[in-house]
Amino acid sequence: MSTTFTHQQFRQVLGQYPTGVVVITAVVPGQPPAALTIGSFTSVSLEPPLVAFYPDKSSSSWPRIQQQGKFCVNVLSAEQEHLCRQFAQKSSDKFSGIDWRPSPNGSPILKGAVAWMDCEVAEVRELGDHHLVVGRVLALDSQASDLPLLFFRGGYGRFIHSSLVAADTRLVEFLPAVEVIRTVLESTATECKAECLLAARLHDEFVVLASAGNLPTVGDARPTRVGRRLPYIAPLGVALAAWGPPDDIPRWIARDSTTGHPELEQWSELLALVRDRGYVIGRGDIPYAALEQAIEDRDGAVCSDIVLEALSEVRETMLTQPQLSDEHAECDVRSLTVPVFLPGNHTLQIGLYGLSATMSHRDLLTNIRRLRSASQRCTEMLGGAAPATPLHDDLEVPR
Ligand SMILES: Cc1cc2nc3c(=O)[nH]c(=O)nc-3n(C[C@H](O)[C@H](O)[C@H](O)COP(=O)(O)O)c2cc1C
């Protein structure tokens, strides 16, 4: 019977079903061990103890594992997304840099795995473009205190019990985008030696969607939590405001103002400058440290008074953007922010935080260029396009 859906629809619909992530491993005599990441793992039977998974017929690792007649199933922890990616790549030595010990049967147990099952191959069948592999479990153990890694709609996450936290389902729509550009965030954080955050506006809130490079802290800067919600109010989200609807700007400057918007002109000028330059600079350590403290101390409300007060201190440092033409000027740059353009006139922003106050003028310009290049790559990867007016490149940066 012919089907009424495309491959893409099949994948999209099946992607609504979350899975755990395991790595199937085996030792291959005379060669590096074989392994592959698997989401299609399931338990099958208690008596006899059977488990199963479905390797693709195109897998080069599965035939090498099958030849050994035995394997180990490693359930990855929520901290092991990097292992999930490493073992999902085609490579002749996926174990490079991986810490493991042998199971009773000799197969690799990955350090930090939440659970492992030592199996012998009980049955292999062809099913469509995959094999069905049934394993008989010979030995097993778990580290129940760790949370497993979860895979859902192309993104990774962890289990949160619904009675403990009301998960914010509005953030789920951003997961695929985060997944697509995660590598850019990670490489930018590494290159610039700072924390790289992806943030979005959700109605009246400014939300941190992803964080990369939780490096050792510099000064008072502390790594930021993903999912952190703050009021969408100046100076948070300057890049979002600069390329967002102009009508939203007065409310972004002063949410409940009864006295008009005395700073409207100043902020409008700043946003025009940001649109022209393509980035915005945050300066000075003290206001940021105070903001972090206020966020920690707040009573749970997104828009609490102490956070608003701390934000008003940071506003000043944002309104005067340094002139970068003077290489001897004191900059004291602590954050750099750029936009990412999504299809349909939506904007995200990428920010670098925890930059060193003693950064040289040359390093500052290099970091700005790196961040702008990250902005361009992310926009392309997400299928968006920068606004028609080209960014004014005012940087004389040594390459
Ligand atoms: C989260 C996740 C789940 C995956 N699940 C499966 C799966 O169930 N079956 C499969 O054949 N491949 C799965 N893959 C892809 C394989 O890991 C990948 O194709 C394989 O490692 C390719 O290398 P190989 O040629 O060495 O086998 C998954 C990848 C990821 C990231």
Image: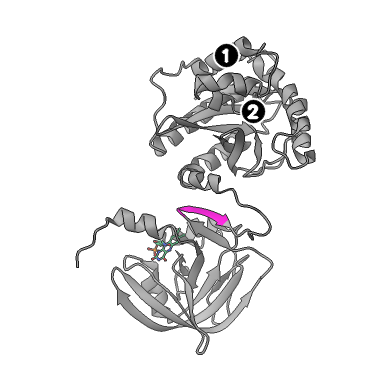
8 relative to 46, above or below: above
Q: Amino acid at mark 2?
A: Ser
Instruction: Check if residue 155 falls in the magenta segment.
Output: yes
CA gap, disc 2 and disc 1: 20 Å
- Within 10 Å of disc 2 (Cα), the crowding (few <14, some 14-19, many 20+) is many
Specify few, some or many for label 1: CA neighbours under 10 Å numbering under 14, 14-19, or 20 or more. Answer: some
**Which quarter of the figure has residue 281?**
top right
Under circle 1, the secondary element is helix
Residue 201 located left or right of residue 214: left
**Magenta-drawn stretch contains 204:** no
Could you tell me which residue is drawn at 60 percent across and 38 percent down? 207
| Residue 195 or residue 205, whichever sits in front | 205
| Residue range corresponding to the magenta coloring | 153-157
Q: Locate residue 273 relative to residue 194 in the image: left or right.
A: left
Ligand 1 placement by image quarter: bottom left
Q: Is residue 73 visible?
A: yes
> Residue 335 — which label?
2
Task: Determine the residue located farthest toward the left in the rendered image.
Answer: 1
Nearest to N terminus: mark 2 or mark 1: 1
